[in-house]
Image (cartoon, rainbow, N blue to C red):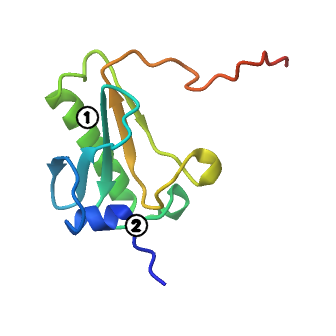
Amino acid sequence: MSNETIFDKIIARQIPADIVYEDELSLAFRDINPQAPFHVLVIPKTAIATINDINADNAHLVGHLYVVAAKLAKEYGFAEEGYRVVMNCNEHGGQTVYHIHLHVLAGKAMGWPPYQDKKKVVV
């Protein structure tokens, strides 16, 4: 049984993606279901399944993903007005591909919290 993900296939060029950035450690491509006018995923070329699997040996890759996110925001003109960077973890965190990735979203004002239940919450 293989743990290969769709991201591994994108890295290997087995399936197409709209790649906007690549270096020796990472790859960035447009999300196929964008949630903002600019929505790219930044992934490490080394597979790490979840945030829970980040350790001292691979932590440098996570920092690198953020450096790439900032570089893309500057290159595409969103650095000054702002952007959001999100990494989900496991099912309840919204993770659907088990290969860590940053969502870089920009091009519109982002609200907080990102999701609000229509029911009034009483604390």
Q: Amino acid at mark 2?
A: Thr
Looking at the picture, tell me which residue is in the foreground, 16 or 10. 16
Establish if 82 lies above or below 8: above
Where does label 1 land, which residue?
A: 70
Residue ID at (37%, 67%): 47
Q: Looking at the figure, which quarter contains the C terminus?
A: top right
Mark 1–mark 2 distance (CA, rounded to whole Å): 25 Å
Residue ID at (24%, 43%): 68
Please tell me how crowded label 2 is: few (under 14), some (14-19), or many (20+) other residues with Cα within 10 Å: few
Per the rendering, the mark at residue 5 is 2
Q: Amino acid at mark 1?
A: Ala
Q: Position of residue 116 (x, y in %)?
A: 64, 22
27 sits to left or right of 90? left
- Mark 1 and mark 2 lie on one chain; the one further toward the N terminus is 2
43 sits to left or right of 27? right
Q: What is the quadrant of residue 122 in the picture?
A: top right
Residue ID at (46%, 44%): 87
Per the rendering, the mark at residue 83 is none
24 sits to left or right of 106? left
Front of the two marks 1 and 2: 2
Establish if 26 lies above or below 35: below
